[in-house]
Amino acid sequence: MAGGPLAPTGVAKERAEQYQGRVTLYVVIACIVAAVGGSIFGYDIGISGGVTSMDGFLREFFHSVYINKQHAHENNYCKYDNQGLAAFTSSLYLAGLVASLVASPITRKYGRRASIICGGISFLFGATLNAAAVNIAMLLLGRIMLGVGIGFGNQAVPLYLSEMAPAHLRGALNMMFQVATTLGIFTANMVNYGTQKLEPWGWRLSLGLAAIPAFLMTVGGFLLPETPNSMIERGSKERGKKVLVRIRGTDNVEAEFQDMVDASELANSIKHPFRNILERRNRPQLVMAICMPTFQILTGINSILFYAPVLFQSMGFGGNASLYSSAVTGAVLAGSTFISIATVDRLGRRALLISGGIQMIICQVIVAIILGLKFGDNQELSKGYSILVVIVICLFVLAFGWSWGPLGWTVPSEIFPLETRSAGQSITVSVNLLFTFIIAQCFLAMLCHFKFGIFLFFAGWITVMTIFVYVFLPETTGVPIEEMIFLWRKHWFWKRIVPEPSEAGKNETV
């Protein structure tokens, strides 16, 4: 319908200074339980690379790769270049892309908890199929079910965390998702380190243990309260207010409650969120929803996490040493996320993204120089240079862990108005999984053809994204989630695009 003067306009004035409340134990526990959804994403990222370097797995499903791996004289960069092997890793992310789009209307109509539960159940089935796989078809079907679980979980969990957290600590609590993801990666690396000794069936245990976080996510979904934003959007204002009072620890929640009611009125007047998100007033959020996850993947981090054992073996590390080295990088990533939690709401999003980007550029260039000068066909790195490469990669992972790792999810989940929040998060997840799929499918071939240049390729992209943040991303720290629209209207560039409320009411069609 036409957006005339009586049409809902969303949050009309800033009330942030009137917000009351504190961090309650109730909201902390809810956020921790919800964040377990991130662990299934992390566990799969960490487990895939280790499993694809295990002899028992390769002998059963990818015999040609197993044969190539045994050859003493070969191109070091190309020994794992097999599209079937890459498809095992990447098929999950293509399925997740589709599932995240399906999850959007479910998350909006039935609540954040519904998508969390759907994701957990699907992941549970996928883990079971993979552990019991006897052929490629069964293996890929299991991966697809895992992808559906990740699509639903990654769509709903960041939204849940952003809506439950008070504005002044939203960054730290939202990063529970990234903490769970990094702990999942580290756990997977340690599992792989143990199961690679259990030939020939250790890979089944690695894949099957994914059922544990899936089970926790499913049970947690049933126990969690729904977010007040979602309840109010679906018409349960009184229930939503009761939950808001409980999670804020005070009865004085009128300002925040009124923002949610205003936002829900506009949200309910919009029947096609994906169409609405293309409108001019939502342009900044749409750009961020596309660019932030794209840039997060183009840091090259997933290449290192997916294929760390393969990458280190290609550099001449032995099987045990390569898994051990990847476990170290997983531990560094998990630890670095706590740096971000401690600083994100004090230093701000922009400072962490820019400083992390600069450190990652330096590390990628150093690794490229070492490999370019000291590593080639039929060569192995000396012990000294091997240790140096691991140290520099750990420094790269450290920088990612306090910057683009958590903030690549946090920023998109907190910037959308309620009426397009679920659709916006679906776009974020879809773009993330699309580029994850592309990199997962292409990385082994890129490593084969680019050789050490692969690290310069990613360094170039990190330079672009660091400049992008400096120029186009406003600081969102401390801004209430329902008042984010005022931020874009004050930004030097976006204020030219985002109309004032009166202008939007006259010129836009809902």
Image: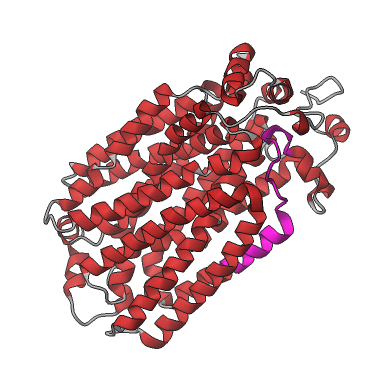
Residue 247 in picture, x, y percent from top left: 57, 24
Q: Is residue 91 visible to us here?
A: no
- Residue 441 left/right relative to 132: right
Compare residues 349 and 313 and report the one nearer the observer: 349
- The residue lying at 52 percent from left, 62 percent from top is 399
435 is higher (above) or lower (below) than 228: below
- The residue lying at 42 percent from left, 66 percent from top is 394
Q: Is residue 168 visible to us here?
A: yes
Colour scheme in use: secondary structure
- Identify the image quadrant of residue 230: top right
- The residue lying at 47 percent from left, 49 percent from top is 433
Residue 502 in picture, x, y percent from top left: 88, 31
256 is higher (above) or lower (below) than 352: above
Residue 479 forms part of the magenta stretch = yes
- Residue 361 left/right relative to 5: left
- Residue 65 left/right relative to 431: left
Residue 410 in picture, x, y percent from top left: 57, 45
Highlighted range, magenta: 461-484
Q: Main secondary structure of the magenta part?
A: helix
- The residue lying at 17 percent from left, 69 percent from top is 67
166 is higher (above) or lower (below) than 234: below
